[in-house]
Structure formats: structure tokens, C-alpha cells
Image: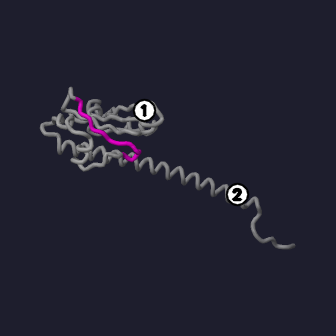
Amino acid sequence: MRQELGRSMIEMVGVLAIMGLLTAGAFALISYGFGVEKNSRVTDNVTAIVTGIREHFGQYDDFSKLAELDNDTIFSAIHVNPKNPYGGTYEVVVDSSNPRQFIVKINGLNKSDCQSLSIKAWVDSVGYNKSNHKDGGATGVCTGQSNNSVFITYGE
């Protein structure tokens, strides 16, 4: 009997198949991790925006001064970058009919990210507080495949 050296073609294909499965699983985990990280950064950014606006513009819980300013000025004053991790921007809007509230708008979202951020619990938002912590507190326009927006109202 002669002893064979090396690997057979079937063994090589088996090893390549296992490596392919492991690589696909790794890509899925990395993609999920990036999604979680983006979501966490958005939460941190919205918290910083809300805190900054309350500190700089919330005298007597009246945010009407914000309506007089453009978003570049607002974000410069609160030292937050208006770009979000999804490639869009943040905006701050005040409803002239209720100057005791302001809206943080997250723009440039794809449909699934928009839906995810719309149902997220936005602690201290008007909707979250009024629903006794049962509603997420945000509304979203999640109709297209891209360029969707989420609106979160803060104040009284």
C-alpha cells in the first residue's frame, strides 16, 4: 500500500464551504453591529440636541426664539453636528402655535431605519410622556425607500 499525501478535492470543497458560511455569518454580525451603533449615535445626538436647546434657548420653557434662527445657527450654538449617521441631517423646528414645544427632525433615513426610529422609546418626549410611557413618542414619514423623516416633539 502506498500512502497518499495532500488533500482530496472533496475535502477542499468542504473546507471552502465552511469558510464561506463563517464569512457570511461574520458579515451579518458586522452589519447588525453597525446598525446598532448608528442607532445609538442617533439617540446620543438627539439627547445632546435636546439638552443643548433647553440650556441655550429654553428660558421660561418658551422656544419661540428658535423660530427666528436657522438650523446652522442653532447647531453652532449647541455645539452639535447637524449631520446624522445615516447620511441625512437633523433639524429643529418650533410650531408657532405652541412655542413651548420644539421638534427634532431626523432626515435622510431609509424605510427600515425610519420605521425603527419611529417606534423607539424617545424618553422625555411629549408623546412618550403623554402616553404614560407606552408610545415611543415619535412619528415618521416612512413611505419611500430613501429620504424619510422622523419627528420627535419635546417640551410641554
Q: Is residue 17 left or right of residue 130?
A: right
Q: Which of marks 2 and 1 is in front?
A: 1
Name the residue at 25% across, 36% down.
Answer: 154
- Quadrant of the rendering where the N terminus is positioned: bottom right
**Residue 65 spot, x, y in % from top left:** 17, 37
How many circles with numbers are drawn on the protein?
Answer: 2
The numbered mark, 2 or 1, whose residue comes first in the sequence reads: 2
The magenta stretch is 84-95
Q: Position of residue 41 (x, y in %)?
A: 36, 49
Element carrying mark 1 = loop
Q: Could you tell whether 65 is left or right of 92 in the image?
A: left
Residue hosting label 1: 142
Quadrant of the snapshot with the C terminus: top left
Residue 93 colored magenta? Answer: yes
Question: Please, what is the three-letter code of the amino acid marked with disc 1?
Answer: Cys
- Is residue 6 depicted above or below 101 in this figure? below
- The residue labelled by disc 2 is 14
The image quadrant of residue 10 is bottom right
Against 154, residue 9 (above or below) is below
**Amino acid bearing label 2:** Gly
Of 87 and 155, the residue lying toward us: 87
